[in-house]
Image (spheres, grey):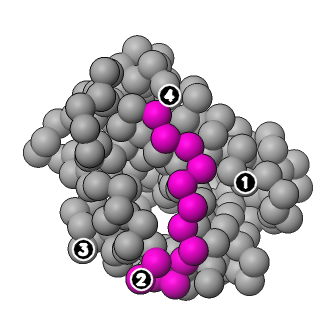
Amino acid sequence: MAQFHDAPSEYLEMMRAALPLYDELQGQVVGATAGLEVSRILDLGCGTGETSRRCLEAHLGAVVVAVDASEQMAQLASAGLGGRCRALTRRLEDALPPGAFELVVSALAVHHLDGPGKADLFRRIRASLAPGGRFVLGDVIEPEAPVSRPTPLDRSIDLPDRLPDLVAWLAQADFRPEVRWAREDLVVIVASPV
């Protein structure tokens, strides 16, 4: 997927232009959080905070810890979300912020990890969830068949995997994964602890 960290202020507009299903994916991620009592959210790969913003609108009593590898992106997320957001500059490979989270979300970020990196992240997410918590992953996958509008990727840094592999790694991390939405080469998976 095209990288937009060089122009954080234009990120959302650029994402929508490059990925016509961007808003639908975001809506599906947030929709998959419904019915959950949430006080603390962890957003992995927060970008400018779009997923965090939508989750906070859906869970009015919650606060979010937003993590991004780009300091500029983390600062934009924090500025846009006010006192309900604590943004940290960290890579997905780094230790997750401490504490238990009722909700962990990630939209269009985990595909930057290789297979073993994804499996490791899923284990760490599982360990960070509060009892009854939920992990919602919205991301690009390697489709089984050609799609009409593939997500633009940079194969040097975008490493999507096949859906069965993601599901298997989530199950190995003691999650019960369920595909909630799939369009083209994008999916939303809800992973609940076993």
Q: Which residue of the protein is positioned furthest toward the front in this rendering?
A: 145
The x and y percentages for residue 174 are 52, 84
Figure quadrant of residue 97: bottom right
Label 4 sits on residue: 22
Could you tell me if residue 76 is visible in this image? Answer: no
Label annotation for residue 116 = 3
Could you tell me if residue 26 is visible in this image? Answer: yes
Q: Residue at x 36, y 43 (%)?
A: 140
Amino acid type at circle 4 is: Tyr
> How many C-alpha atoms fall within 10 Å of the one at disc 3: few (<14), some, or many (≥20)?
few
**Gap between marks 1 and 3 measured at Cα:** 26 Å
Tell me which segment is drawn in magenta.
171-183
Label 1 sits on residue: 33
> How many C-alpha atoms fall within 10 Å of the one at disc 2: few (<14), some, or many (≥20)?
few
Of the image marks 4 and 2, the number of the one nearer the N terminus:
4
Relative placement, left or right, of 181 versus 113 is right
**Gap between marks 4 and 2 measured at Cα:** 29 Å
Label 2 sits on residue: 172
Q: Secondary structure at mark 2?
A: helix
Q: Quadrant of the C terminus?
A: bottom right
**Gap between marks 3 and 2 measured at Cα:** 12 Å
On screen, residue 133 above or below 51? below
On screen, residue 42 above or below 120? above
**Gap between marks 4 and 3 measured at Cα:** 26 Å
